């Protein structure tokens, strides 16, 4: 049934509420009404007027107002027809039903807004005979339809009783219909009026109501109405059942939701809510982002979830932070690369002295990028001793190619969530360091430095180096998945540059994905040049001496490098220069002036006596002492190997914290000399009656590797034969039982260490000659190299 509502609405809305006439018996005299043959026609939308029923309507259309006014001035009768389609604004005669109701205008009220409200009562049904006029409104000849008397049999009375019961049940099941409506229905005694009144109030389609009106026989009308009421009752029962079920299932969360919705409405009335403003700001920001389809879908779901939440709920911040990350990430936002290779080379040369191999690789990458326009970025890894500028080189590369620069240290990292992110359900969850870095620089193609990749932790809490496999694989990183973001992100345009000191500490699978570029330590000449170009100006500025006129000569710089530092890089040199600048600042503060030139004597006064000296290598050694060359992760170093003979039972003692490989090299050397004793004029009894003791000084430092093989053999041969090893001579190479000399690694670091130590001759395997050719000839000036193939050649060269 329709809800009882006595509010009058405009005709355009056409939501009517029929009213029961004050005198129900008026319906008995309906057929006595004198109806002229021609009537003005009033089209109605969304409803059908039945005989006996009173309707209040607001007339809005000009034609309709004219028709009502003319009818009211005449006999107050008007023909009312329902429109077939309520959406038609200006209906033609074809848009109207053929059967309607003659209505008497009970009351006409002029409204202040110019509209007209009329109360009409249906009188008799009619059928359109012919249209006589359509201007200024429809007029038609009408044919009155005779009303059939209600049968007096029990069958029809049962129909009427059933209709009343069904209508009463519907009223009881509908909470919005007042219970008084049921009382009114029971008091209607006229069967014909009862059918018309219920049909008018029935929640049925216009077409079905029109069908009831058009039926000639009252019994057929009652039958159709009963079917419609049965359907309405079933719908009301189902609706009531669902309502009750929903109420029983309304738990605390749903109750809170409804309360929040009410609160939201109240806040809207008071001037809006901060939550809504935040959501709108996010949506506006998202419109300017180039989000991929998957990200757009996830963002849409997140926003919908956020709109349903109250800011005080714990999950609100989780969803908000996740959406905030999505908007902060630089999706498909790239900086423009600078393809000016000459300018890039100039920047690289200005920032770093030497390192030609790295500079060439970067320029090659730029050249390909310039020609092709798009390519996967290489994954470079700079390996070398500390302090040689690996990390700062990454920043220089970014400047050279015009990209953003971001760095994060992997040293000591032990949780793979630092790379891939935490799942956002955890308290304090964050995205991984990779996405955090991109979020910070607002670019999807920065130069990203992965510092100290060889010092990644690996314990029970996780293995970050395995998580890095996806990041640093060009075939996979275009779909990098972060646990917090829960989306794939394209890292293929990022230029990753890893740095490490020791390649052996990098996981093999990870090492396979890296393009290794070895960076050796600096020669004295390179260090002096770096000090002049970068370190001295930097320290002068740091200590307020930028405008002071004093000079540090090349000779003084070389003295500082040789006597006060022993390193592959320049960090210790930087600290020594800082000490000199602090002294100079104190001198100027106390005396008001500075000496124009710093002399070697001044350096000794400031830094103290020399920490390192090459004199130890110039002293004539006793037989059994040989000088070897070693490689460490901080650069090359000098190694003394001492051998002595004492009475015993032919034992071999090894001391100096040696590793297994080094011990085996000593055994191999001894076995080689035993098997070739006659060749070198050695008495075989020595191996049975003498104890051979080999010691490598600095016993606290662990030592290992095969490169001391020829040095150990030379030391043993020197002790047994009683011949001294040639002074200013160093050697490095692996040996075999057959007497061959094999190549070793770390040649540049070893050679530079020998140069720093003041040595003049070096014995190497002939296969290492290619490594010597890669070193700048200016840095090895004054060194003489002997390339050997056999142990015989080593002994001939080494022993005086």
Image: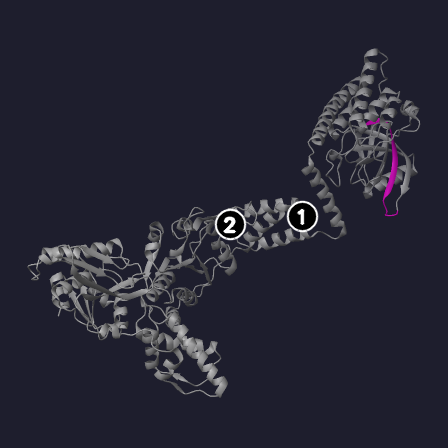
Of 320 and 410, the residue lying toward us: 410
Q: Is residue 29 magenta?
A: no
The residue that label 1 is drawn on is 312
Q: Which residues are magenta?
A: 112-126
In the rendered view, would you say 573 is above or below 323? below
Of 559 and 325, the residue lying toward us: 559
Of 639 and 92, the residue lying toward us: 639
Of 665 and 120, the residue lying toward us: 665
Q: In screen coordinates, is 782 left or right of 249? A: left
Q: Quadrant of residue 736?
A: bottom left
In the rendered view, would you say 131 is above or below 389? above
What residue is at 50 percent from the left and 60 percent from the top?
441
Horizontal and vertical percent for residue 183? 87, 24
Question: Distance from label 2 to label 1 (Cα)?
Answer: 31 Å
The residue sitting at the top extreme is 154
The C terminus: image quadrant: bottom left
Horizontal and vertical percent for residue 575? 41, 73
What residue is at 83 percent from the left and 29 percent from the top?
101
The N terminus: image quadrant: top right
In the rendered view, would you say 304 is above or below 412? above
What residue is at 35 percent from the left and 54 percent from the top?
506
Quick one: SS at disc 2? loop
Q: Is residue 122 magenta?
A: yes
Disc 2 or disc 1, which is closer to the eye?
A: 1
Kindly identify which numbered label has been placed on residue 292.
2
Horizontal and vertical percent for residue 91? 75, 38
Q: In screen coordinates, is 311 left or right of 459? A: right
Horizontal and vertical percent for residue 298? 55, 46
């Amino acid at each position: 049934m329709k809800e009882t509502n006595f509010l009058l609405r405009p005709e355009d809305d056409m939501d009517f509420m029929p009213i029961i006439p004050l005198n129900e018996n008026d319906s008995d005299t309906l057929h006595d009404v004198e109806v002229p043959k021609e009537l003005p026609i009033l089209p109605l939308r969304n409803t059908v007027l039945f005989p006996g029923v009173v309707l209040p309507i607001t007339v809005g259309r000009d034609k309709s107002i004219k028709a009502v006014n003319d009818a009211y001035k005449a006999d107050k009768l008007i023909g009312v027809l329902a429109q077939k389609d309520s959406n038609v604004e200006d209906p033609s005669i074809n848009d109207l039903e053929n059967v309607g109701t003659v209505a008497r205008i009970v009351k006409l009220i002029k409204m202040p807004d110019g509209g007209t409200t009329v109360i009409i009562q249906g009188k008799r049904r009619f059928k359109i005979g012919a249209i006589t006029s359509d201007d200024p409104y429809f007029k038609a000849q009408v044919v009155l339809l005779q009303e059939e008397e209600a049968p007096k049999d029990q069958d029809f009375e049962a129909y009427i009783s059933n209709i009343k019961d069904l209508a009463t049940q519907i009223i009881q099941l509908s909470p919005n219909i007042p219970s008084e409506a049921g009382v009114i229905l029971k008091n209607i005694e006229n069967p014909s009026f009862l059918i018309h009144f219920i049909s008018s109030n029935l929640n049925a389609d216009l077409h079905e109501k029109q069908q009831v009106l058009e039926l000639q026989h009252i019994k057929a009308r009652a039958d159709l109405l009963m079917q419609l009421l049965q359907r309405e009752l079933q719908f009301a029962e189902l609706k009531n059942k669902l309502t009750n079920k929903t109420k029983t299932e309304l738990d605390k969360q749903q109750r809170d939701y409804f309360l929040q919705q009410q609160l939201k409405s109240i806040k809207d009335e008071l001037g809006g809510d901060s939550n809504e403003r935040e959501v709108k700001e996010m949506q506006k920001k998202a419109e300017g982002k180039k989000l991929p389809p998957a990200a757009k879908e996830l963002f849409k779901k997140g926003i919908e979830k956020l709109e349903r939440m109250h800011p005080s709920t714990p999950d609100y911040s989780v969803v908000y932070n996740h959406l905030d990350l999505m908007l902060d990430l630089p999706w498909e936002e790239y900086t423009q690369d600078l393809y000016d290779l000459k300018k890039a080379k100039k920047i690289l040369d200005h920032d770093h002295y030497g390192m030609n191999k790295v500079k060439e690789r970067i320029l090659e990458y730029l050249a390909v990028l310039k020609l092709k326009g798009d390519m996967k970025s290489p994954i470079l890894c700079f390996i070398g001793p500390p302090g040689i500028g690996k990390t700062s080189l990454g920043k220089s590369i970014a400047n050279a190619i015009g990209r953003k620069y971001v760095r994060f240290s992997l040293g000591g990292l032990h949780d793979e969530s630092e790379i891939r992110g935490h799942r956002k359900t955890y308290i304090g969850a964050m995205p991984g360091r990779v996405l955090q870095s991109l979020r910070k620089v607002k670019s999807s193609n920065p130069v990203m430095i992965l510092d100290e990749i060889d010092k990644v932790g690996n314990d029970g809490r996780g293995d970050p180096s395995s998580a890095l496999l996806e990041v640093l694989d060009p075939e996979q990183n275009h779909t990098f998945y972060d646990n917090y973001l829960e989306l794939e992100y394209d890292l293929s345009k990022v230029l990753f540059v890893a740095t490490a000191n020791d390649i052996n500490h990098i996981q093999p699978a990870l090492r396979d994905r890296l393009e290794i570029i070895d960076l050796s330590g600096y020669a004295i000449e390179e260090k002096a040049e770096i000090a002049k170009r970068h370190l001295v100006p930097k320290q002068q500025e740091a200590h307020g001496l930028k405008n002071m006129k004093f000079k540090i000569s090349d000779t003084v710089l070389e003295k500082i490098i040789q006597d006060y530092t022993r390193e592959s890089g320049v960090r210790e040199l930087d600290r020594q220069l800082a000490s000199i600048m602090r002294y100079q600042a104190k001198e100027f503060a106390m005396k008001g002036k500075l000496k124009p030139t710093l002399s070697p004597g001044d350096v000794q006064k400031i830094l103290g006596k020399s920490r390192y000296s090459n004199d130890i290598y110039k002293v004539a050694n006793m037989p059994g002492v040989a000088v070897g060359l070693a490689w460490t992760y901080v650069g090359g170093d000098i190694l003394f190997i001492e051998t002595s003979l004492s009475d015993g039972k032919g034992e071999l003692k090894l001391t100096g914290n040696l590793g297994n490989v080094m011990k085996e090299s000593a055994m191999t050397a001894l076995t080689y000399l035993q098997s070739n004793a006659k060749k070198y004029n050695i008495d075989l009894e020595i191996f049975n009656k003498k104890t051979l003791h080999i010691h490598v000084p600095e016993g606290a430092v662990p030592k290992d590797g095969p490169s001391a093989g020829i040095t150990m053999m030379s030391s043993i041969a020197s002790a047994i034969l009683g011949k001294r090893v040639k002074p200013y001579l160093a050697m490095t190479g692996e040996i075999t039982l057959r007497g061959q000399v094999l190549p070793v690694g770390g040649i540049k670091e070893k050679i530079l260490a020998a140069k720093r130590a003041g040595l003049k001759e070096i014995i190497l395997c002939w296969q290492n000659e290619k490594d010597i050719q890669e070193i700048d000839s200016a840095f090895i000036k004054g060194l003489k190299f002997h390339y050997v193939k056999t142990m015989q050649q080593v002994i001939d060269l080494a022993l005086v």
